[in-house]
Amino acid sequence: MQKISDRVLVIAPHPDDEVLGCGGFMHRLAGEGASVQVVVMSGGKPGLYADEAVQNVRQEARSAHGFLGAGETVFLDFFAPELDLYSVSELAGSIAKLIREFKPLRMFIPHRGDIHHDHRAVYNAALVAARPVQGCSVKEIYAYETLSETAWAPPFADDAFIPTCFVDISEHIEQKIEALRCFRSQLREYPSSRSVEAVRALALFRGVTVGLFWFSVNWRIQSFELAYKNGGIHHAQTT
Ligand SMILES: [Zn+2]
């Protein structure tokens, strides 16, 4: 299996999106020598969320990320659930600063069609922040699939999540589940879509669509190097 040793920036609108979306891949990348950094864009808006609850879920996130092998997590303080009320430049500026400091090769972001407008705002801002100008280090951008957000997108083609990159997490699905268990405040009992059973079912389903076992999927948005090598950016690929 090809080794992947590079820098990866994972951007989450809220704590747990990143583990639901690409926790298995994070663990795989870290195990292969990649340096994985997570940035959580938001804290809860005062009045809607108690500070104690915000601090609690941040601690849960630190535990989950540490378990997956990620480095120290960055928490920004934009208010959730109102990220769409900030200007794109304001959100993008914060992300661009992290990109300049961390110099990631790959970036993982939420899907643009997710039902939560915070996710859409982060998607837009991340693409602006990672424009291939001024020596930006980002060469590949992937959108991850977040259970309880992506599946509830409006039923229009523009919002559909169509995976184009399949990542083998057969050796990492249990670690993804364990990391999710760190989020005691967020995980729910089956048949909630935010349950351990649902996470397993989705990974299994995505795997069998390519005839393999446990998979997580991404939607490749831009891949500057691979676009050049493969002659296109929409080729389905298993990794
Ligand atoms: Zn979210």
Image (cartoon, rainbow, N blue to C red):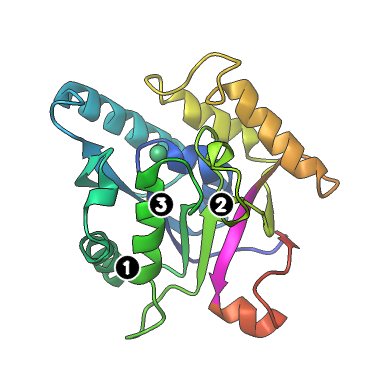
Q: CA distance from mark 3 to mark 1?
A: 19 Å
**Side of 7 where 125 appears, left or right:** left
User: Local crowd at mark 3 within 10 Å, few (<14), some, or many (≥20)?
Assistant: many
State if disc 1 and disc 2 touch (CB < 8 Å): no
Type of amino acid under label 3: Arg
Range of residues picked out in magenta: 217-223
Number of labels in the image equals 3
The quadrant in which residue 234 appears is bottom right
Q: Is residue 37 above or below residue 145?
A: below
| Circles 2 and 3: CB atoms closer than 8 Å | no
- Residue shown at 68%/78% (left/top)? 232
Q: Amino acid at mark 1?
A: Ile
Query: SS at mark 1?
Result: helix
Residue 73 placement (x, y as % from top left): 31, 46
* Mark closest to the chain's N terminus, 2 or 3: 3
Q: Which residue sits furthest top?
A: 189
Look at the image and tell me whether residue 119 can be seen: yes
Q: Is residue 218 magenta?
A: yes
Q: Residue at x 41, y 23 (%)?
A: 186
Secondary structure beneath dot 2 equals helix
**Residue placed farthest to the front in the image?**
156
Say which mark, if any, is on residue 120: 3
The quadrant of the picture showing ligand 1 is top left
Residue closest to the eye, 20 or 168: 20
Q: Which mark is residue 99?
A: 1
